[in-house]
Amino acid sequence: SGERDAMQRLKEAAEKAKEAAEQAQEAAAASAAAAEESNKAKTIFLSNMSHDLRTPMNAIIGYTNLARKPEATPEQIQKYLTKIDSSNMYLMALINDMLEMSRIEIGKMELEERPTDLRKMMDEIRDMFEAQMVGKNIAFAVKYDGLRNPVVLCDRNRMNRVILNLVSNAFKFTSEGGHVSVTLAEKECIEEG
């Protein structure tokens, strides 16, 4: 009877050890899957960022080349420098986003809402793409005439990235001699706020 009890306890201990090993194996598999998902997310993020970085870099290069032309007037050079500065600020925001990747990994990316003049933002986006569009002989228009409330509360950098991605894709997939038009419209709001 004592031997039978010892055998029973031994079987129970072996069963518990087997269950613990299975749970550890499941946890390890789940951890490996999570790590793989994290790496996949990083790869997608970096791919998108490299695409996003090209737009302001192309604008900076294009306007720098225009400013260096001997026939450029001081007024034109000042205009180009303003556009280069705008593209530079956007580029810095993108680089800061890349540096914040650790916040993405732990799910703590927060929106930085602040009042944003959509007209100014759209003018900057137009300026950023203008030289590229001319170089590809694409008619390019940015319209925002119908805005009654041009200043909105939003995360300017992320809103900028969304619109830049859309315009960048339109540029990329529009044939030479085509037309790209970006229209910002305001819909009637039913609710306050």
Image: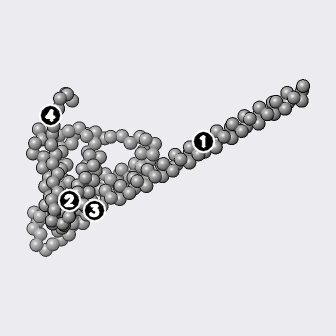
Residue 53 drawn at (x, y percent): 31, 58
Q: Is residue 100 left or right of residue 176?
A: right
Between marks 4 and 3 in the image, the one whose residue lies nearer the viewer = 4
Which quarter of the figure is the N terminus placed in?
A: top right
* Dot 4 or dot 2, earlier in sequence: 2
- Between 116 and 41, which is closer to the camera in this rendering? 41
Q: Is residue 30 above or below residue 16?
A: below
Which quarter of the figure is the C terminus placed in?
A: top left
Crowd rating for badge 3 (residues with CA inside 10 Å; few <14, some 14–19, many 20+) = some
Give the residue pinned by disc 1. Answer: 27
Say what secondary structure mark 4 lies in: loop
Task: Name the amino acid type tagged 2.
Answer: Phe
* Dot 1 or dot 2, earlier in sequence: 1
Task: Name the amino acid type tagged 1.
Answer: Ala
What residue is rendered at 19% in x and 49% in y? 121
Q: Which mark is residue 129?
A: 2
Residue 154 drawn at (x, y percent): 25, 40
Task: Name the amino acid type tagged 3.
Answer: Met
- Between 54 and 91, which is closer to the camera in this rendering? 54
Between marks 1 and 3 in the image, the one whose residue lies nearer the viewer = 1
Residue 178, visible in the rendered structure: yes
Specify the quadrant of the image occupied by residue 20.
Answer: top right
Crowd rating for badge 4 (residues with CA inside 10 Å; few <14, some 14–19, many 20+) = few
Q: Which mark is residue 57?
A: 3
What residue is rendered at 56% in x and 43% in y? 30
What residue is rendered at 87% in x and 29% in y? 4
